[in-house]
Image: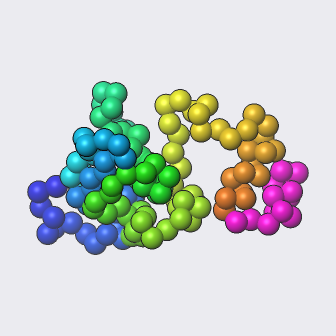
Amino acid sequence: MDDQANLPDDASAAIHFENLTFTYKRTDRPALEDVNLRIETGRFVGLIGRNGAGKSTLARCVNGIVPKFAKGKLAGRVSVLGRDVSTASVAEMTPSVGIVFQDFETQIFSTGLTREIAFVMENLGRSREEMRAAVDH
């Protein structure tokens, strides 16, 4: 964005990418290079582009999968509702961020609904009693 001075503070943006560059391990070519983008609360945004353009990598930066699990070199900043994603765990970001990728079958943990619900709740730090109650309803 050209006019950074007129933008509201970081907390007003649902998602804010600042000078974001990410290069996967074992490659020299950045998957993302100097991305600057604000998505205000209440907006719906679609990422479109050719294969390998960085759409999935950008989405994975929002909840912290990149760089915590997809290893590489990250520069810049990503914040969600004013919170710096680099200082939060993926589990902490889960209540604010949901992502459905093109091949949804690769992101499902289990073929059974009970195990799928338990997997998500366990990653959120919920007790076994809470998991049982959620599955029973």
> How did the renderer colour the structure?
rainbow
Asked if residue 21 is positioned above or below residue 108 in the image, the reply reads: below
Residue 128 point in image, percent of width and height: 83, 62
The residue located at (73%, 44%) in the rendering is 116
- Percent of width and height locating residue 29: 25, 41
* Visible residue check, residue 78: yes
Q: Residue furthest top?
A: 50
Magenta stretch, overall SS: helix
Q: Is residue 62 visible?
A: no
Magenta stretch in the rendered image: 125-137
Q: Residue at x 30, y 27 (%)?
A: 50
Residue at the (31%, 48%) spot, across then down: 23
Q: Nearer the viewer, residue 43 or 63?
A: 63
In the image, residue 87 above or below residue 46: below
Residue at the location (88% across, 51% down)?
Answer: 136
| Residue 133 belongs to the span the image colors magenta | yes
Residue 135, percent from left and from top: 83, 50
Which quarter of the rendering shows the N terminus?
A: bottom left
> Hey, which residue is sitting farthest left in the picture?
2
Return the residue nearer the eye: 21 or 80.
Answer: 21
* Left or right of 105 on screen, residue 22: left
Left-right relation of 56 to 126: left
| Closer to us: 45 or 118 | 118
| The stretch drawn in magenta includes residue 47 | no
Instruction: Please tell me whether residue 35 is drawn above or below residue 84 in the rendered image.
Output: above
Q: Where residue 6 sits: x, y (%)?
A: 16, 67
